[in-house]
Amino acid sequence: MKKLKTFLSNKQTIIGLIILSILLIFAIFAPIISPGDPLFSTGAPIQGPNNNHIFGTDNMGRDVWGMIIWGSRISMVFAFGAAGISLIIGVVLGALSGYIGGIFDDILSRIFEIFYIIPRTFLIILMVAIFGSSVTLMVIIVGATIWPSNAKIMRAQVLTLKNRAYVQAAEVAGGKKLSILFRHIVPNGIGPVLSNSTLQMAQAVLTEASLSFLGLGDPAVASWGKILQAGQSHISSAPWLVIIPGIVIALMLLAFNLLGTALQMTLNVKQQLFE
């Protein structure tokens, strides 16, 4: 409870939650806020903000407001989906690596390093080009390429905690190794991993926007990256096509980074209390 109060009392937490809440409302109530298919051309191309189109239209006559609202859904799916996959893979492999040790730890550590050596953006683009660009598949691909940082953090936490007195007591009491690991060690060491996962949400959103900007996103859904792609050749004549989605993307990244930083600060306070 003390950790939660400390976290919620942080100004960064409050600002991050306000921004994220607004974007979540957009995502959840998109059919009500902006009815209809946002990819359907509803106006003349390259219209500035007006009464009919709050944020104007792009080069295909699509309503930018509608694409912003519906695009928030895709960004949220990527943020929570990819970070969730990364969290699960990273926690499981990192915990097993640190707890079992030996050759098993050496093999997994080399795998972690291989993922770090390969340029992540290139790997994601290659996999999307090979397997397709559906939202579900892209979320899995992104999540399956950003997990090593979570695994390394979890491994370090397990190496620190596995020699604590309560762990040794559980082992003496005859507890099974996997039970001790996931019931006693992981819950006590997962805090820094959760903080890193929050930052990975921002990374996933930026990755999705980048893929859509490059034309590798799902063509059947609205995306903030698609608006940027449409506006890249109309920067001087239609600056709203770049400015508006750029601001929205920056706000979502800011929200996740503020929450991740606040969580990290809360955990540091917790650690200092035990020193």
Image (tube, rainbow, N blue to C red):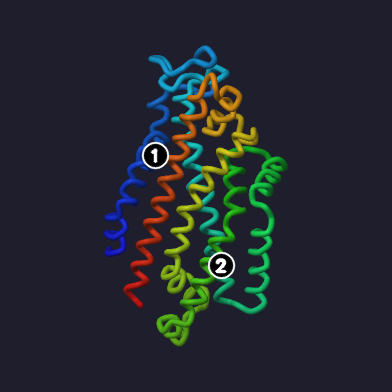
Q: Could you tell me which quadrant the C terminus lies in?
A: bottom left
What's the residue type where badge 1 is placed? Leu
Q: Quote the CA–CA distance across marks 2 and 1.
A: 31 Å
Name the residue at the top extreme. Answer: 44
In the figure, residue 206 lies in which quadrant?
top right
The disc label shown at residue 94, or none: 2
Whole-percent x and y of residue 112? 63, 64
Task: Tell me if residue 105 comes above or below residue 17 in the rendering.
Answer: below
Dot 1 falls on a residue whose secondary structure is helix
- Note whether 191 is above or below 197 in the view shown: below
Q: Residue furthest bottom?
A: 172
Left or right: 177, with 141 as reference point:
left
Frontmost residue, 92 versus 16? 16
- The tag earlier along the polypeptide, 2 or 1, is 1
The one nearer the camera, 87 or 207, is: 207
Question: What residue sits 57% from the left and 22% below the top?
Answer: 234
Residue 255: x percent and y percent? Answer: 40, 46
Label 1 sits on residue: 24
Residue 83 percent location from the top left of the image: 51, 52
**Observer-nearest of 212 and 48:** 48
